[in-house]
Image: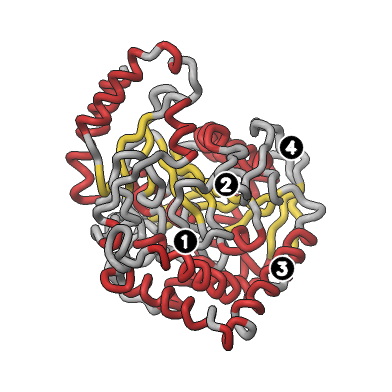
Amino acid sequence: MIVERVEEYLDRIEKINKDINAFIEVKPERVLEEAKKLEKDDKVKKKPLYGKIIAVKANINVKGYTISCASKTLENYIAPYDATVIQKIKENGGLIIGISNMDEFACGSSGETSYYGPTKNPRAKDRIPGGSSSGSAASVAADLCDMALGSDTGGSIRNPASHCGVVGFKPSYGVVSRYGLCDLAMSFDQIGPLTKTAKDALLLTNIIKGKDLKDTTTVETKPFEKIDIKGFKVGVVKEFMDVVDEKIRDKIEKGIEVFKDLGCEIVELSYKYVDLALPTYYLINYVEFFSATRRYDGRRYGYRIEDVCGEEVLRRIMIGSMISQKEYSGKYYKNALKARNLMRNEMIKIMKDVDIIVGATVPKLPHKLGEKLTPMEMYSYDVLTVPANICGLCAGVVPCGEINGIPVGLQIQGKPFEDEKVLSAMIEFEDAIKG
């Protein structure tokens, strides 16, 4: 059974991946051998992920695979160990089918900056799939796997989930171990699922979450369960809606009506720090990314990152280097940290009396592949997703319609460690719109 399903997926990958470019590396002989072993292993047949076939973003270590972060810098790096999330997947009967494409070192919102070439959006092939977890979202949307893992620094799971018409979930910071993840910005990053259904997002989140002694930021939480959302107070932030394209806003407003029909109370909220989101996020991102890249010096493994990386990676390294210098850190970086606390405190304040916040994921439709955008135009994709990372919230995306064949995703956000509420709202919304 599992072997047959793996063969079917491998056949689809062989036929489709040359066009979509969702996968960087697939090892057919290895995955078939692992599938045969799974079928013979009676111990894992009752495990919750038994037989699930999973793609993994190219910045999460999977032993024996090339974990390049989609960069020439690490094109020869073979992972010597499994990340904690991969260990948990394997222990629960999951099967890794391959390594998915991404923006180089997760620096991007379009899926176009990979050293291995851009990923196409399977639902709208002339458009970007979103990033940086482009290959993970595309592999799910193109039915090349059952589910996938991505990482979310400022929307890198939710952005491509919205553009590709799949489900994506960013757990609260600390819920999932980052051990084995190649950091973009360590104080923002979280690993999370991209799936075909919200129920699968709940399933995979429950498998990968939990306290890990190898990651001191992690916490233990009880298993997340589907709960009844009738009576939930659902917040709608006026300022978030104001920055959204009119056609997308129309889809989101119809989505909000669904929550009314589900017995929820809609509450209008105001968040006065929307304008701080992008500068605060990117200033901290630049500094943490610059710090993280100092390990890629060309001496221990790979190439020196400055010698081979792309334009966006260089931009973040150069700006991070500058603003982390003593004469600038007080002016920029320390002020960004103050702004982060300000934003977080205000967000917790406005969410005090609501269960979740709903709204758009991205403010505009994905641009066409190859279309030239300025850095600020590219960064603007993130304005509605970075607040969750800045404030440590949990946040998920479910499809809520299409505009001229291009998917649109509804974003649902919750207070820190109230992941269960967000996942439950995602499931009920999905069930409601599917009828």
Q: Which mark is residue 360?
A: none
Q: Dot 4: within a 10 Å radius of its alpha carbon, few (fewer than 14), some, or many (20 or more) residues?
A: some
Task: Calculate the distance from the C-alpha at mark 1 to the C-alpha at mark 2.
Answer: 16 Å
Q: Secondary structure at mark 4?
A: loop
Identify the residue at horizontal 58%, vertical 40% (top origin).
212
Task: Calculate the distance from the C-alpha at mark 4 to the C-alpha at mark 2.
Answer: 36 Å
Q: Secondary structure at mark 2?
A: loop
Identify the residue at horizontal 77%, vertical 51% (top origin).
354
Return the residue at label 4: 230
Task: Calculate the distance from the C-alpha at mark 4 to the C-alpha at mark 1.
Answer: 38 Å
Which one is closest to the eye, mark 4 or mark 2? 2
Identify the residue at horizontal 53%, vertical 56% (top origin).
189
Q: Position of residue 221 (x, y in %)?
A: 68, 37
Instruction: Tell me which label, 4 or 2, sits earlier in the chain.
Output: 2
Q: Classify residue 216 as left or right of residue 245.
A: right
Q: Classify residue 403 as left or right of residue 304.
A: right
Q: Dot 2: within a 10 Å radius of its alpha carbon, few (fewer than 14), some, or many (20 or more) residues?
A: some
Q: Please state which amino acid type lies under the numbered disc 3.
A: Asn
* Residue 2 placement: quadrant: top left
Return the residue at label 1: 184
Instruction: Tell me which label, 4 or 3, sits earlier in the chain.
Output: 4
